[in-house]
Image: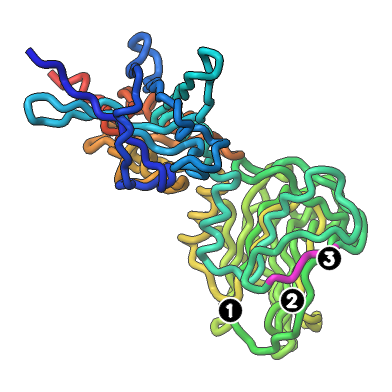
Amino acid sequence: MPFPVAIVEIAFDDGPYVVSPTWTNVTSYVREMTTDRGRSDDWGTFDGSASVVLSNRDRRFDPFNTSGPYYGKLLPRRQIRITATYGGTTYPIFRGFVAGWPPVWTDAGKDSTVTLSCFDAMGLLASDAQPVDWARNYILTTSPRHYYPCDEPVGPYTANQSLKDYGSEPLNMLTTAAASSGGQLAVGLVNSSVTGTGSEAALSAQGGTNNSPGSFSVSCWAIPDGSTSGSSQFVTGSIYNHFFYFGYSATTGKFFVEISEPSFANTKIVSTNISTWDAGMARMFSFDWNSAARTVAMYIDGIAVATTTVNSGGIVVPLPEAVNIGTGSVQQVIVWSTGIAQSIFQEIYKYSTVAFSESTAARFNRLIANTSFPSGMTAAPSAPASTVLELTDDAPMTTAELQRVADSEYAPLFVTRAGVLTLYNQNQIRPIE
């Protein structure tokens, strides 16, 4: 009975994320090869590897040989494919990536080999990080006018330190007095928060004046300080022909928004009806100003809260457009030059707290979408039996996060011989009786 005919091919001209690269047959240079796929026991994780020894007598696989046919292409993570033909049918054996090209000389320099240590997609994604801040990409899709993550600097905060504005109006935030780096406000919000000190608060972006009336929305994470007398103004600013305060009253125990309307010589003070909030708990505070109706909708952690509105004769004339950090630890400050729906605030809250209840298939696809790995080389469970809630923040590695999903599904996560990253559903290996 004839043996299968092995074929080894390498994609010298394409990167690791190309689904259908141009393969070059190097079988004639192969001296030996081995493959290993599987796991050590029922509770271990799957991995796949291969080792291919290539003849390098003419130095064609030497990355330092400038005259070699593959010079400049002998790079880590080049794709490799091993197949075997038997009875007229070609079977996949291994598809993965080359770790490196280390040439070795023997027999007094008369012979040379290159041993390719190869890993599969699980190894590739083990060094591919997920987002540091899950909320950031989603927030940017909402087209904010100003967006300050307030995640820099990690060390002590100093006067006149610029903060990056990721909004459509890139006006850098500058402080007029010293503030300090606060603690992380919520899971998913990264590194640090900015702590303002009331009258010596951090002054932010200032730009041109926009006097046209219009709706706008503001959101931030903050920790209300119940120990202060008076009020904690998390965020203040000017936009259109309005001036706004957004904060917490330690006197009443209520959250409030103040909107000054110079066009109407009026200030609206909107306060929550209840005063049972935990002053020391980080929360996401948001409001939407409807310019046409002259009303404020307030949201805490994405949930609409009942409010009472009081009109006042005192007004504040708006300065050139500005966003200011007030009193208390504040992070993820967002200003939109349009009205924002509650559903968007809720999505931001979910991303900020990295809490999503979704099927293992949806989570698998979400993680892959945050990498460059091609979805065409993946197979999520077709009929997932479990759900997943939490996402890991601060840039976890993709393979580790995928394994958490597999543990939730209680099913194997592995790479097929054809290189497809696959997650079974639990009923594929544990059929329902």
Q: CA distance from mark 1 to mark 3?
A: 23 Å
Residue 72 appears left or right of 12: right
Above or below, 309 relative to 417:
below
Pick whichever, 261 or 99, lies toward us: 99
Question: Which residue, given by chain and number where applicable, does mark 1 sit on?
Answer: 215
Position of the N terminus by quadrant: top left
Name the residue type under label 1. Ser
- Residue shown at 53% from the left, 26% from the top: 102
Q: Residue furthest top?
A: 41
Classify 132 as above or below 121. Answer: below
Identify the mark nearer the N-term, 2 or 3: 3
Residue 263's label in the rendered image is: none
State the separation of the CA atoms marked 2 and 1.
Answer: 12 Å
- Binning the other alpha carbons within 10 Å of mark 1 as few (below 14), some (14 to 19) or many (20 upward) gives many
**Magenta range:** 170-174
Of callouts 1 and 3, the N-terminal one: 3
| Residue 84 percent coordinates (x, y) | 20, 26
Residue at image x 35%, y 19%? Answer: 31
Q: Secondary structure at mark 2?
A: strand
Q: What element does badge 1 sit on?
A: loop
Residue matched to label 2: 238
Can you tell which mark lies on residue 203?
3
State yes or no: discs 1 and 3 in contact (Cβ < 8 Å): no
- Picture coordinates of residue 417, whole percent (x, y): 27, 28
Q: Is residue 6 covered in magenta?
A: no
Q: Quadrant of residue 378?
A: top left
